[in-house]
Amino acid sequence: MVSERQRAKKKWFPIVGKGEFDKIKLGESHVNSAKDLVGKHLKINLMVLTNDPKKQSASLMFKVTSVEGDTGVAEIIGYQMSTSHVRRVVRKAIRRIDDSFTAQSIDNVTFTIKPLLITRHSTNKGTASLLRKRAKEVISQSFQKMKSDEVFLQVISNRLQMDLKSDLKKIYPIAVSEIRLLQRA
């Protein structure tokens, strides 16, 4: 027998952003009621949100946390660089340095961070290890000075990546300094 929930007609409900993307329409979802929006995940290209073609290689991940009227309100839970962009910046005769660690913001929100560093020339393992260690220190220290909303703003505007690059180039010339993944843990 068909349940009442299955028989109910689904409708389209809009989803808007929260924080920096306040009241910007992120999309719509086809659900039975507005309450069913809570918990839905969205992945949206950053170029669409900022109207900046230079940012088409990154995406933001949102999660609907509340409902106001018939509209879902979503907050940012992650930032991700596309794999095709990573493949494009990696070349021969260079060193790709990846890392993955967690850091806390000043308001005790834990983030998973995956930075990507690419040197201008091929380096030895000792230098790569030193760069990886210093990158972890710089990112952790800067996160401890920011609130969770500011963390995403810094990464979206590339300020964190530029600060990281300027700090690391004292050790060895860096061609690319990116945050491949940033997620709330």
Image (cartoon, rainbow, N blue to C red):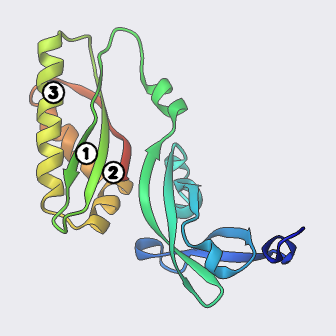
Q: Residue furthest right?
A: 1
Question: Regarding mark 1 in the picture, which secondary structure is present there?
Answer: helix
Q: Assess whether mark 1 and mark 3 are in contact (beta carbons under 8 angstroms).
A: no
Q: Assess whether mark 2 and mark 1 are in contact (beta carbons under 8 angstroms).
A: yes
Q: Residues within 10 Å of mark 2 (few under 14, many from 20)?
A: some
Residue appearing at x 28%, y 52% in the figure: 111
The three-letter amino acid code for the residue at tag 2 is Asn
The three-letter amino acid code for the residue at tag 3 is Leu
In the visual, does 102 lie left or right of 77?
left
How far apart in space, not on screen, are marks 2 and 3 (Cα)?
19 Å
28 lies above or below 67: above
Res 135 → quadrant: top left
Residue holding disc 1: 162
Residue appearing at x 58%, y 64% in the figure: 40
Looking at the figure, which quarter contains the N terminus? bottom right
Residue holding disc 2: 158
Q: Nearer the viewer, mark 2 or mark 3?
A: 3
In the visual, does 107 lie left or right of 141?
right
Residue appearing at x 25%, y 56% in the figure: 110
> Where residue 53 sits: x, y (%)?
56, 50
How far apart in space, not on screen, are marks 1 and 2 (Cα)?
6 Å
Q: Nearer the viewer, residue 135 or 63?
A: 63
> Where residue 41 sits: x, y (%)?
56, 60
Label placed on residue 131: 3
Question: Regarding mark 2 in the picture, which secondary structure is present there?
Answer: loop
> Where residue 18 sits: x, y (%)?
46, 76
> Where residue 69 sits: x, y (%)?
61, 91
88 lies above or below 46: above
Question: Regarding mark 3 in the picture, which secondary structure is present there?
Answer: helix
